Amino acid sequence: MRLFDGIIFDIDGTLSSTNALIFASFNYVSKKYLNRTFTDSELIALFGPTEDVILKEWCGDNYDSARDDYYRFYSENHNSMAADYPGIKNILEKLKNKNILLAIYTGKGKEAATITLKKLGFYDFFNMIITGDDVTEHKPSAEGIKKFLDEYTLEPSKVLMIGDAPSDIKASRAAGVKAASVVWDSYAKEEVLQLGSDFIFYSVDDLEKFIDQNT
């Protein structure tokens, strides 16, 4: 039985292990322009706005050069510091072959999202890519999910949002779509589990079995 006509994916911690790269990219810039570095937890606390918003707040008049440095570092170190989770590409291929509409809804800005999706070979799987640059309010706002629903005239009950963070669950609930949480690499696993998604997956294999049975 096909439960879903559309599936929305987050990127970081869901499709790819990019958190270490993100932390390193921010610290490369902060060390150069602020003469300091940040802990992982300090950087996680900044998540929500796009990279550009954070860099602008940090660097002020040096924003343009800091931005160039950030994305150059992010791109040049992507292959060595980030990767897709084994099995994810197979899931995307299966969904595409079943004509399930696929979207991205990420807090990343457009440039970082495009770099990651293209380097992993995922970009062309998606019918719609919604980044932090494409919405007025970032997650946990449901704005990005609603854009996808409206674009393809989808019933919320027939759409699934897959992410690793509490904000993904909250956005899903606000939009009326089903929420699936993946916790194989979540930086907020305990909070995610406490919020109680409709579906929880501890491994890519578990997610793939669910996709096979419900699409």
Image: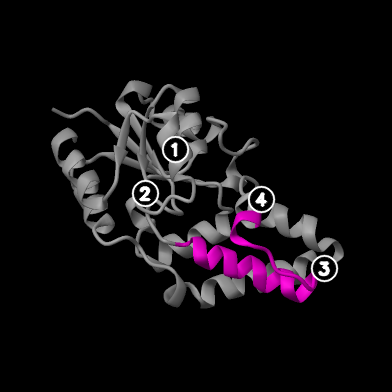
Tell me the residue at 49%/45% (across/down). 188
**Mark 4: few/some/many CA within 10 Å (<14, 14-19, 20+):** few
Q: Can residue 32 be found in the magenta stretch?
A: yes
Marks 3/1: CA distance? 37 Å
Mark 4 or mark 1: name the one nearer the start of the chain: 4
Marks 2/3: CA distance? 35 Å
Marks 1/2: CA distance? 25 Å
The residue type indicated by label 2 comes to Phe
Residue, disc 1 = 192
Residue, disc 3 = 62
Residue numbers of the magenta segment: 18-42
Q: Residue 126, which numbered label?
A: 2
The residue closer to the viewer here, 211 or 115, is: 211
The residue type indicated by label 4 comes to Leu
102 displayed left or right of 171: left
The residue closer to the viewer here, 90 or 33, is: 33
**Mark 2: few/some/many CA within 10 Å (<14, 14-19, 20+):** some
* Quadrant position of the N terminus in the picture: top left
Tell me the residue at 46%/54% (across/down). 12
Marks 3/4: CA distance? 19 Å
Q: Residue 46, which numbered label?
A: 4
The residue type indicated by label 3 comes to Asn
